[in-house]
Image (tube, rainbow, N blue to C red):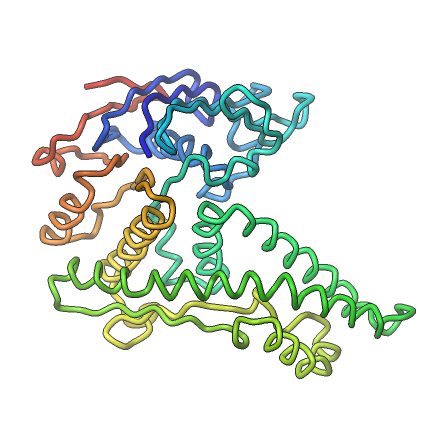
Amino acid sequence: MRLDRLTVQDFRNLRSATLAPAPRLTVLCGPNGQGKTNLLESIWMMTGGKSFRGAKDAELIRRGQPFGVVEAAFEAGGRPQTLRLTVGSRESGRPGRRARLNGADRGRAASVAGTFTAVVFDPNHLSLVKGGPDGRRHFLDAALCQLYPGYLAALRRAARITAQKNALLKAYDITPGGEMLLDTYNEALTAAGAEVMRRRAEYLQRLAPLAAANYRDISSGAETLALRYCPCCDPDADALATRLRAVRSAELRAGFCLAGPHREDVEILLDGQPGKIYGSQGQQRSAVLAMKLAEATLAGEVLGEHPVMLLDDVLSELDDARQTYLLTRIEDKQTFVTTCDSAAFARTNGMLVQVLAGEVRAC
């Protein structure tokens, strides 16, 4: 996977920018608030996923403009390809995110997921360790959506059924035929939910040892990382059906769904202790980096080509040894890094690009 050319128009604060990146390391440098992370975000949007910063469509379009546009020429699957993504405002007549792949209209941007693949690290991803289970589930789901085309459909089915079931449980006493309807929702959730849970379990089983090895190397063997899957039950349809029957009375009392893929978590342990409680800021950052590097390695194994790496302010709060390790790991893969101080990258062969006031200039 290699990005050869990127053109951005009216995306966030980037009025018009063109980037011809290096085949390996491209360093985006400049003061804070100039558009470095926006440029990374525009690359990430080509994966067909949501903004890694959780932005709504209106926030992605430069103020006063009807559309934001991102175009890319890249190599994937052994051949050159092109992708054009538009983000339309409500007033544009074509709202939402739409994609054209190799000149053909593909409709919603999510339809091209898996065509251009990337792994992103953002300082907000420290919530993987520090935050609640929703962020850790999203980490698994975002990776799986790029690897397996049918996963997004199963995930959306499970989410839709869970929402419908929650609505029923809240109004169960005044809903005619509520018992039969609840049985129907449980049956549908068993099928869709078990598929999501199985994929997550299989993915984490492969990811965990890779992440542990990365963290061992990052810490020079001084610390350990372990990832532990915490499902609501065994990840298969029979186990989920049994669990849903067991919690039925409790769900009726609670008024919401108590079992399914929306109730899972991943425990992150540093030296056998919960990283959320006992990990320092540097250790937590190292844990997330270890997971992200493992995500990239696993994507390369599944897809046959390494994804593009997007690293936002990645060296902060890492000591010299951890910085050196990371720079060594990314030197032979196409990587985009943002920084306010390019001095740390002087020891690399990376191409320096300056981003100032939404304009992109090669140094």
Which residue is at 43% across, 55% downward? Answer: 139
Which residue is at 28% across, 65% downward? Answer: 209
Relative side of 311 to 349, left or right: right
- Measuring from the top left, give residue 303's x and y in whole percent: 38, 45
- Measuring from the top left, give residue 273's x and y in whole percent: 29, 76
Relative to 257, say whether 210 is above or below: above
- Measuring from the top left, give residue 7's x and y in whole percent: 40, 19
Relative side of 13 to 307, left or right: right
- Measuring from the top left, give residue 162's x and y in whole percent: 68, 62
Which residue is at 56% across, 49% downward? Answer: 150
Relative to 260, say whether 51 is above or below: above
Relative to 275, say whether 337 is above or below: above
Relative to 231, say whether 116 is above or below: above
Which residue is at 65% across, 21% downward? Answer: 92
**Dividing the picture into quarters, in which one does residue 340 lie?**
top left
Count of numbered labels shown in the rendering: 0
Relative side of 226 to 189, left or right: left
Residue at the front extreme of this rendering: 78
Residue 302 or residue 218, whichever sits in front: 302
Quadrant including the N terminus: top left
